[in-house]
Image (spheres, rainbow, N blue to C red):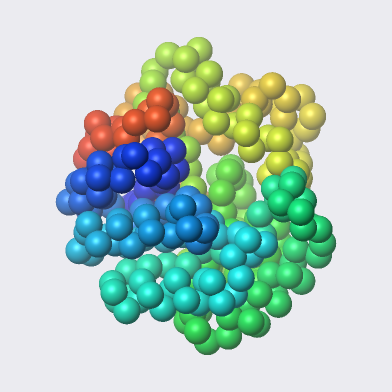
Amino acid sequence: MSVISLWGGGPWQDPSKLAEAREVAAEVEELGYHRLWFSGGFDPGILPAFGELLGATRTLGVASGIVSIWTATPDDSAEAFARFEAEHPGRFLLGLGNSHAPAVEGGGQRYDKPYTRTVEYLDALGDRVPEDRLVLAALGPKMLELARDRTAGAHPYFVTVEHTVAAREALGAGSWLAPEAAVVLDEDPVTARATAREHLAVYLALPNYTNNLRRYGWGDDDLLHGGSDRLVDELVAWGSLDDVVAGVRRHVDAGADEVALQVLGGDGEFPRRQFRELAGALIV
């Protein structure tokens, strides 16, 4: 089995839950998870949490999943990396991405030439962040090639197993591939898919994700109303523990070096029981 990590949104970003987040991070480390992909950027509300999670653990890796190149400057990223590297050597991985037009333009910027912008960002970073401590949220062929050539690899988000196959081929054998994989431990198809759709609906409103799905043959009927059953079942592994493990293994068999599990359905709380069950089934 490849490396198994966790993707932490939701309660991990709630300042009122910071003490519990530290406790859960220590438990996650003891369970054997490799890394915590912590969502969010380097704004004043999120930046301290990276250090808190690193400080609460001894060996657990922490990665930014994903810092937007439109909201954090190259200097911001370099300074954050230097700080975490000085305090917790070898444990912080910088994940960068070009975000989405609605988010960027909603913030008052023009979403123009994201690929070129990413190249310029990497140029500005220079050697302040070593390539082996940097990954890109790459989806399309050009971004995957850039991840291969300029960073340690790719952290694709909201992707099917078919994308993992294509990403592995584009990256080649020498680059790290760490897709995010959403999971729901619920054997009832109605409630499991409802939980999945609540999650999917947010991302199916973003053109970068829908364009990527269209690249693999998904059509309008699949992308509406939180996704068709077929799309839900491809994007989210749900069911019994064995069913979910089988879904995660599909990404591994497709070439993933690391799978970042996002456990859905926690209702704003840390799904600690699910973390334990998944670790017992997936981590050797």
Nearer to the camera, 191 or 72: 72
Above or below residue 10? Residue 152 is: below
Q: Outermost residue toward the left?
A: 30
Residue 233 visible in rendering? no
View extreme (bottom): residue: 127
Q: Is residue 8 above or below residue 114?
A: above
Query: Horizontal and vertical percent for residue 104?
Result: 72, 53
- Viewer-side residue, 241 vs 276: 276
Q: Residue 224's x, y, as percent?
A: 73, 25
Residue at x 55%, y 60% (from the top left corner):
67
Q: Quadrant of residue 249?
A: top left
Query: Of 219 and 52, which appears nearest the observer?
Result: 52
Q: Position of residue 40 (x, y in %)?
A: 50, 52
Measuring 39% from the left and 18% from the top, which residue is drawn there? 187
> Is 50 drawn above or below residue 18 in the view shown?
below
Q: Residue at (29%, 74%) from the top-left corner? A: 87
Residue 98, picture quadrant: bottom right
Q: How many marks?
A: 0
Q: Nearer the viewer, residue 132 or 233?
A: 132
Residue 161: % across, % down: 56, 44
Can you tell which quarter of the image residue 223 is in? top right
Q: Is residue 60 above or below residue 123?
A: above
Query: Is residue 182 visible to the viewer in this orientation of the structure?
Result: yes
The residue depicted at 69 percent of the width and 21 percent of the height is: 225
Q: Is residue 188 left or right of residue 116?
A: left
